[in-house]
Image (cartoon, grey):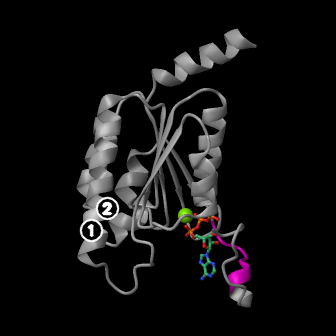
């Protein structure tokens, strides 16, 4: 059993793989963070950068308690209303720079960029910078989440899961619930 997991680790270390979780259905962030749990449980090192959001969500608090997982948020604690403010752009740029450093050092096996697609869509960070990051990274499982994945990101990805809403209780006026949505 031990030999088997060591083999897995070596195989993962040597490969670059780009995953995208997008679509309008529920489950993108939780899928990526589920992957973080699985990786950490197998002794892999995980770095998570959450863009756009900055509140201490339940999942962020839980992930911080796990050995092998480092989480940082690069968003304000309130939602971006109509258009972003300069602080939103500043934080997103800071996040991108941090991710660049993390990828350059190459000490993490899995790097998750939660809501990065939203950051691009809102114009907080240029698409070309994220595409450059994807090109430059090596030996890493790089995971990008958020609605509206840009077609050029989809093109570069090795795995794209589009989570489609078929039903969602918010249409019945059920508000986001602590512990379930955040
Ligand atoms: P999750 O974090 O549950 O995996 P997600 O990452 O796929 O979901 P996001 O688009 O990041 O989804 O939205 C965050 C959460 O808010 C999701 O759980 C989603 O179901 C919920 N949500 C989205 N739109 C609404 C809405 N209008 N009212 C209430 N909840 C919503
Ligand atoms: Mg999400």
Q: Which corner quadrant of the image does residue 67 belong to?
A: top right
Q: Residue at x 40, y 85 (%)?
A: 81
In the rendered view, would you say 170 is above or below 7? below
Image side of residue 170 versus residue 120, left or right: right
Calculate the distance from the C-alpha at mark 2 to the C-alpha at mark 1: 5 Å
Q: Is residue 115 left or right of residue 85?
A: right
What x and y, as percent, mark residue 44?
A: 56, 29
Residue 130 or 158: which is nearer the viewer? 130
Q: Which mark is residue 92?
A: 2
Q: Position of residue 72 (x, y in %)?
A: 44, 52
| Magenta: main secondary structure | loop
Q: Residue at x 35, y 55 (%)?
A: 152
Q: Quadrant of ligand 2?
A: bottom right
Q: Do the CB atoms of the residues marked 2 and 1 lie less than 8 Å apart? A: yes
> Is residue 58 visible to the viewer in this orientation of the structure?
yes
- For image coordinates 24% across by 52% down, the residue present is 129
Q: Which residues are magenta?
A: 164-170
Residue 91 sits in quarter: bottom left
Q: Position of residue 84 (x, y in %)?
A: 31, 78
């Amino acid at each position: 059993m031990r030999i088997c997991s060591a083999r897995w680790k070596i195989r993962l270390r040597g490969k670059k793989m780009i995953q995208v979780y997008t679509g309008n259905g529920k489950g993108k962030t939780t899928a990526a963070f589920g992957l973080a749990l699985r990786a950490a449980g197998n002794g892999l090192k995980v770095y998570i950068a959450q863009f756009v959001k900055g509140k201490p969500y339940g999942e962020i608090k839980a992930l911080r308690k796990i050995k092998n997982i480092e989480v940082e948020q690069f968003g304000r604690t309130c939602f971006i209303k109509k258009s972003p403010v300069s602080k939103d752009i500043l934080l997103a740029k800071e996040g991108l720079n941090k991710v660049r450093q993390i990828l350059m050092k190459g000490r993490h096996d899995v790097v998750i960029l939660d809501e990065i697609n939203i950051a691009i869509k809102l114009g907080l960070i240029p698409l070309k910078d994220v595409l450059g990051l994807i090109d430059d990274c090596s030996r890493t499982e790089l995971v990008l989440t958020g609605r509206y994945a840009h077609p050029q990101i989809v093109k570069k990805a090795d795995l794209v899961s589009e989570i489609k809403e078929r039903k969602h209780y918010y249409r019945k006026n059920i508000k986001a619930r602590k512990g379930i949505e955040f």
